[in-house]
Image: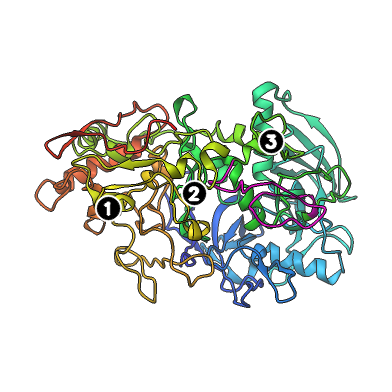
Amino acid sequence: FDVGRQGVLYRVSLADNAVGAPITLAPTANTGFNDSSGGVTGCFPNQLGGIAINNNRVYVTGICASPRGPTGPVTRMDNSVDPSNFKTQVHAGVWAVDTAMNREVVGEGLLLTRAFQARYDANMVPDTAARRMPLIPSDISFVPGARIAYVTAYGADAVFRLDLTTPTSPAVGAGTSQHFIDLAPAGRLPVGISVLSSQRAVVINENTRNLSLIDLSLQAAAGVQASAPAPTGVEAEANTGRRFFVTGLARWSLRGQAWNSCESCHPDGQTDNVTWFFARGPRQTISLDGTYGPGGVQRVLNWTAIFDEVHDFELNTRGNSGGVGAIVHRANDGATPPSVTNADRVVFDGTAAAAPQVATATNQAALNGSTRSMMPGSLGSNAVRSALRDWEDIDAYVRTIRAPNAPSNLNPTDIAAGRALFIANNCAGCHGSPAWTISRRFWTPGEATNAAMGSLRTTRYTLPAGFPAGLNPPANNMTRSAAVRFDDLPNAGANDQINCLLRSVGTFPATLGTNQPGVAPSGVLVREVRANMSTNAQGATGFNPPSLVGMLAGAPYFHAGNARTLEEAFSNTFAQHHQAFAANFLVDGAGRAEQLRQIVAFVLSIDDSTTAIPVAQLPGGGGMFNPDVCPTSL
């Protein structure tokens, strides 16, 4: 399991630019939140956010990630839902480092979710939106001359007070009633704070583009000051979508308490580099910068091609974050506090609705129907419309996400040689096209294509002569053909995917034993199980090729984080991957080390400005064949 990582802090001398030895921040063995099975959950520091020095201590804020399952809602014997798993995945943390010893002081760190949960319980705060967790602690600042700190929570639109006067026994909140300083709705998505005195602080807000002025004597926001013009047009739509993407309030997490959000796994829309255990198996977070390619071409989503619209992640909001979600038949979030409940939901996954919920006539979840067709103003045929268009705004935001720029210190000669190797060894057979992946949505989601017997299931594809059959297991049969979409209807809920996109490249075991071991080099442990931590994972039929943009920020690699570095991804353990269309690429020999350095340099250099390599016809079977075996359109 991906549970043992550490955070890393570096001390740099500005006098001579000397860098000290890394200072590690240890994982937490027990978060204080047990999962639905009663198991103890731990977490490790990830996505470090803010830093401040006070009284010979460095304090660092960040997310403490807990990716091990089980995840999602669990139905109890009395048919009520156990919410435990929604509280185990991400935690807000503050870590303390001794500036003299340059090492962590474990007893002086603080898991903020645990501390505030205890505070709310002790003060009998209703288990409603009145409670708020400091989701994504973005910055920290101290009262001058004191050990009182204030932390901004990016995903909670709030500031949280910490009293570190007694380091080994810290306190949170102020008095008995001031649990946090609410910035919303005037200030949303706080990214930084400066405490000016014991009476005043100022917070900068990304979404509302203003400064919140904080009266610390009242522990309250005292007004805002605009810092930039409000966005308009398409930019405003994407800015709103960004807020929904980040926030854990209202409808976006359990009881609107800011337990989780899209941003907590996709910082800046990219990747937290963590392997989470989901319904289909262990899944390394995919950066969203490859969701849309030039011209708006969309990659089919997730590692096993199970979603075809960004709107389908409503299922994650409900099943992973515990939120009501934004596909609803009524919007009740205008009240203070918001009064959204699961009764507002549109039930669209084919299950029965419990009044006053509203259900769609047919299944619209994942590869069924179209969740986008339920948006207000949609021209789709779905008779049920959501009262909100929040997922349209999120989709607008996702279209704006771009990959980080390539490193500036790569050797240009190695990049050029690596590009030539990429072309010569037919890597574009899986990672070609302007989007750097052959994965593309070649249909318009809707009833005609996505219904139980729609064209996705009735259309078949055939592997051309020369295409390695083992590379696409669904069509590895006598006829070398298969349905475009997984067609085992009785098991579709657990295995539904787009078959023609899948590529089996040796990252999943040929057989799974009782311990469900995965494919990985020495020192990397992978367990191929689903979210319940026991059922075998999906992956025997291959994986949906990811885009290669932004690989410099994407380690570890493959669906389960099987390879820690690109050098490891190109090792002999994964020879089947880089030799998919070139049997002798990177074979052991005198030139391997040089070629490895060159191909790694090229992959690291791929950003949105890199000239794309098209999917080319490949030789095989006595002629040439197209490695993209999916239909052009339906």
- Main secondary structure type of the part rendered in magenta: loop
Give the image location of residue 316, x and y in percent. 61, 52
Say left or right for 456 vs 414.
right
Q: What is the C-alpha distance between the residues marked 3 and 1?
A: 39 Å
* Residue 375 - label: 3
Q: What is the C-alpha distance between the residues marked 2 and 1?
A: 20 Å
> What element does badge 2 sit on?
loop
Answer with mark 3 or mark 2, whichever residue precedes in sequence: 2
Circle 3 crowding by C-alpha within 10 Å: few under 14, some 14–19, many from 20: many
Front residue (pair 371, 519): 371
Q: Amino acid at mark 1?
A: Asn
* Residue 476 - label: 1
Residue drawn at (38%, 39%), measured in percent from left and top?
548
Judge whether residue 275 can be spotted in this image.
no
Front residue (pair 298, 196): 298
227 part of magenta stretch: no
Q: Amino acid at mark 3?
A: Met
Residue drawn at (58%, 68%), measured in percent from left and top?
105
Give the image location of residue 315, x and y in percent. 62, 51
Give the image location of residue 151, x and y in percent. 71, 52
Q: What is the C-alpha distance between the residues marked 3 and 2?
A: 20 Å
Circle 1 crowding by C-alpha within 10 Å: few under 14, some 14–19, many from 20: some
Q: Amino acid at mark 2?
A: Ile
Name the outermost residue toward the left. 590
Residue located beneath label 2 in the image: 306
